[in-house]
Image: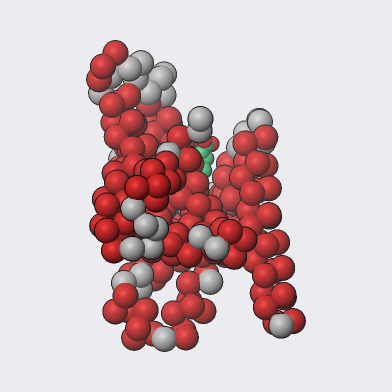
């Protein structure tokens, strides 16, 4: 089973035992989902330090780390975008309580992806990083995605949500732009096999199409 589905298993098991959408349900599932979201990082660290006979990160560990963290950042972005369609289609409103955590994990993995690039790949050479951002279009796109994520992460608290009111929703629609920029960044840096990047693009297109469909059908009511 793909590891990305793991966060849903504890939620499902807890939902069998305790009433979904109750306080004990969230008290139990939130820390579990948090730990499950950390699993990709833990797995990478275990591989990096070859713990428990794991094979390490291969011939180019920095590249492997960079790619894995970038992919997890993108997966969490897409999983965050999946919350609204799942609520609409299957009435899984309880997912809303996990959306902030999922979005912040996307930010977390993308920041780690950037730090791997900036520190391990570029040796924190600010001039070289700046040159890359200006001269390599896929890095320009990645940087755009990261910078756009910052205001979303800062305003993700309940207090900010209350303070910003309707503008909060407008601001957080940026997540769709960020996802487009991120998939584009992925696609642009691929040298040979574009299949993986195309699959991520397809998932995003489906998510965007459902978003357009839902807002049209809501307007029609
Ligand atoms: C929204 C933010 C971002 C997301 C979702 C993201 C995601 C990704 C993904 C999925 C890959 C491809 C992994 C693979 O091929 O297996 C990648 C590659 C890469 N990203 Fe990002 N990235 C983001 C931002 C950035 C930023 C800010 C930088 C640096 C300034 C950056 C630098 C790179 C580099 C250097 C590569 C590898 C290129 C290569 O191997 O030739 N990314 N990123």
Q: Is residue 71 left or right of residue 41?
A: right
Relative depth, front residue between 15 and 119: 15
Relative depth, front residue between 205 and 197: 205
Residue 200 image position (x, y, % from top left): 61, 45
Relative depth, front residue between 96 and 111: 96
Residue 62 image position (x, y, % from top left): 37, 31
Please tell me whether residue 179 is drawn above or below residue 50 in the rendered image: below
Q: Residue at x 71, y 83 (%)?
A: 221
Picture quadrant of residue 121 = top left
Q: Residue at x 33, y 63 (%)?
A: 22
Q: Is residue 17 visible?
A: yes
Q: Residue at x 55, y 63 (%)?
A: 91
Residue 143 image position (x, y, % from top left): 46, 57
Query: How many numbered marks does the figure carry?
Result: 0
Q: Is residue 134 visible?
A: no
Q: Residue at x 52, y 69 (%)?
A: 174
Q: Is residue 30 left or right of residue 199?
A: left
């Amino acid at each position: 089973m793909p590891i990305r589905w793991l966060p849903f298993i504890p939620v499902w098991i807890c939902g069998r035992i305790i009433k979904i959408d109750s306080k004990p349900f969230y008290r139990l599932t939130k820390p579990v989902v948090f730990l499950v979201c950390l699993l990709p990082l833990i797995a990478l660290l275990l591989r990096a330090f070859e713990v428990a006979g794991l094979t390490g990160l291969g011939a180019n560990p920095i590249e492997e780390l960079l790619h894995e963290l970038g992919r997890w950042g993108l997966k969490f972005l897409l999983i965050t975008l999946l919350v609204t369609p799942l609520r609409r289609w299957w009435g899984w409103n309880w997912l809303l309580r996990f959306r902030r955590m999922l979005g912040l994990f996307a930010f977390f993995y993308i920041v780690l992806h950037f730090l791997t690039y900036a520190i391990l790949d570029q040796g924190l050479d600010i001039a070289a990083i700046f040159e890359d951002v200006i001269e390599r279009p896929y890095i320009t796109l990645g940087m755009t995605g990261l910078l756009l994520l910052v205001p979303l992460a800062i305003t993700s608290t309940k207090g900010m949500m209350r303070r910003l009111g309707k503008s909060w929703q407008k601001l957080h629609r940026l997540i769709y732009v960020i996802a487009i920029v991120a998939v584009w960044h992925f696609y642009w840096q691929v040298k040979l096999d574009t299949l993986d990047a195309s699959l991520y693009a397809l998932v995003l297109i489906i998510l965007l199409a459902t978003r357009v469909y839902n807002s049209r059908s809501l307007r029609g009511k």
